[in-house]
Amino acid sequence: MKPTCDIAYKEWASVTEALARGTYVMSLRKGGIHEKRGEFSVEHREFFLFPTYLHQRESDLVPGVVPLLEETRRAALPEGQIPIRYYVTVEDARYIENLDAILALDGLHPFTRAGVEMRFNYKKPGLWAIVQRVYRLPEACVIPDERVYAGCRSWVPLKEALSTSGAAAVLEDAAFAAKLEEIKNAKRKT
């Protein structure tokens, strides 16, 4: 893990919290409309999670994550303040162009089948499956929301690098290894 980092990754606040609780270690990504060349790519292997509240849709989330929509809204800081609580290392990232292969990952990410299919088919078929190891910072680092952070983009260059000192994995090594094994077993089925 890098000692400091100046990159953040925008993710729905509800999904951020599901990842931070260790419920899931995988997220699926298509990308925002302001991505480079109009397409998402895994440009960074380490980053902070930047919680967003825009475009969260209950219908796209599995029932166990739906309560996190309201929970994260209630816990949100006043407008103009972004809480950075989690750091991520990417353990694996694959672009999957086969819908059956994506659907075989059901239960390993926080999205409903309808949400997955909608994302998969948007513009051109395919989705990124990103396996993430999440680390909790010792305390939240609250940064001011900046105009440059706005818009439908995944990657946000922070104005200042933040420290990762004291960050602790949300899942113990054995629990994380078990989640990785579930993902490998799901991939073997396709």
Image: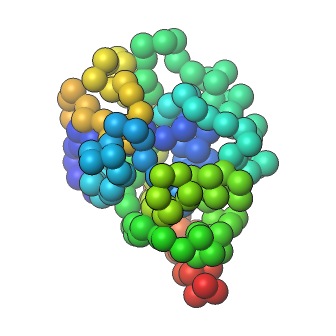
Residue 141: horizontal and vertical position, in percent?
38, 28
Q: From the viewer's perspective, is residue 169 above or below residue 142?
A: below
Nearest the eye: 190 or 159: 190
Looking at the image, can residue 78 be seen?
yes
Residue 185: in sight, yes or no? no
36 left or right, relative to 85: left
Res. 159 image quadrant: top left
Q: Position of residue 176 (x, y in %)?
A: 53, 68
Residue 147 sits in which quadrant? top left
Residue at point 61%, 35% (across, down): 56
Residue 89's place in the image compared with 34, above or below, is: below
x and y, in percent, of residue 189 in the image: 64, 86
Give whichever of 125, 171 is nearer the camera: 125
Instruction: Return the residue nearer the eye: 107 or 71.
Output: 107
Determine the residue positioned at 33% across, 46% down.
38
Q: Give the number of callouts.
A: 0
Q: Residue at x 68, y 67 (%)?
A: 106
Q: Residue at x 57, y 21 (%)?
A: 76
